[in-house]
Image (cartoon, grey):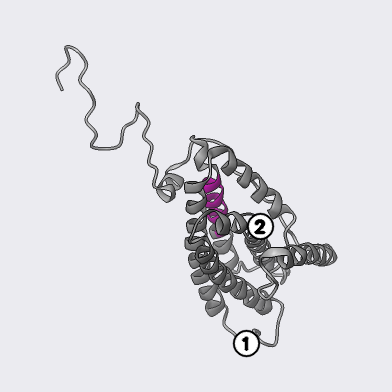
Amino acid sequence: MDTIDVLRSYVVHAHDNLSSRFEVARAMLHTPGQPRKGYEHIDTFLAVASKHLNAVDAVLLPPTRRLAPDGGTVVHDYLHAAKGLELALAHAKGREYGSVFDAGRPWQAVWADVGTALEGHREHEFGVTELLASRMDPAALTALADRLHAAERAAPSRPHPYAPHTGFPGLVARKILHAVDSFWDAAEGRMVPEPVRPPHKAPGKVTQYFLADPRFDEDHPPPGTRQPSSPGVEQ
C-alpha cells in the first residue's frame, strides 16, 4: 500500500469501529438479572468516541490550521461538527445514568441525534484528513498516524463538550480530564478498550471506496474487464 494512505486508512478504520460500536450500543441488549450489563456497550462506545475526538483535536487540527490558507475555516467547521457529536454523546451518557435533563427522553430520540452527529463528524474529519494528505509527504503522514494513536491512549474517556479543544487551554484540559476520567473509570469498573491501530496492509474494498482509490488484482480483474488474448487462443 502507498504510505500516503496510512493516515486516511487510520481514520477510516476509526470510524468503521465507531459505527460498529454505535450499532451494538443502540441495540440496547436485554440482560435479565444483570440490569447494568446491557449498558456496558454504551459505556464502551462513549469511551472510544471521546478518545478519538480528543486525539483529533490534539494531533490533526494544529497542522491543518497551519498548512493551508483555508485551514482555519476547515478547523472551525470541524470543531462545530465535533462539538455537535460531543453534545449528543453527553446526552446519551446523561440518559444512561439518569440525568434529570435527559431521564424522560426516549432512547430512540437520543440515538437518532447521535447517529446524525456521527455522520456529520465523519464527513468533516475526512475533509481534515484529505487536506493533510494533499499537503504532507508520506513519512509525515505515517508519523501523524502514530501520534494520533498515542494521543487516543492518553485522551479523556468521557464526553466534555464545553472543555477547551485547541491551543494550550485544550492541552491542559485534556491532561486534567484524562486523569479525572481514569479515576472514575477505575472506581466504577468501567470498561475502556485500548485503541487498536490497523495494520499497514493493502486497503480493503470499503477503505478503497472511502479513499476514492480503487485497486484491482491483475489476476482477478473487476467484472466486465476483457482479459488480454494469449497467443494462439481465440477469445
Q: Is residue 97 magenta?
A: no
* Marked residue nearer the N-terminal end (2 or 1): 2
For the C terminus, the quadrant is: top left
Amino acid under disc 2: Ala
Circle 2 — which element?
A: helix
Please name whichever residue, 223 or 51, is drawn nearer the observer in this view of the structure: 51
Say whether residue 82 is left or right of residue 216: right
- What residue is shown at x 47% (from left), y 47% (from top)? 134
Q: Residue furthest left?
A: 234
- What residue is shown at x 50% (from left), y 56% (from top)? 68
**Residue located beneath label 1 in the image:** 104
Query: Magenta region: which residues?
Result: 7-18
Identify whether 37 is placed above or below 204. below
Q: Position of residue 4 (x, y in %)?
A: 50, 40
Say whether residue 170 is left or right of residue 233: right
Q: Position of residue 41 (x, y in %)?
A: 65, 63
Please name whichever residue, 169 or 223, is drawn nearer the observer in this view of the structure: 169
Residue 13 numbered tag: none
Identify whether 65 is placed above or below 139. below
Quarter holding residue 222? top left
- Sort mark 1 into few (<14), some (14-19) or many (20+) by Cα contacts within 10 Å: few
Amino acid under disc 1: Gly
Q: Position of residue 223 (x, y in %)?
A: 27, 37
Mark 2 and mark 1: Cα distance apart in space: 32 Å
**Residue located beneath label 2 in the image:** 55
Q: Main secondary structure of the magenta part?
A: helix
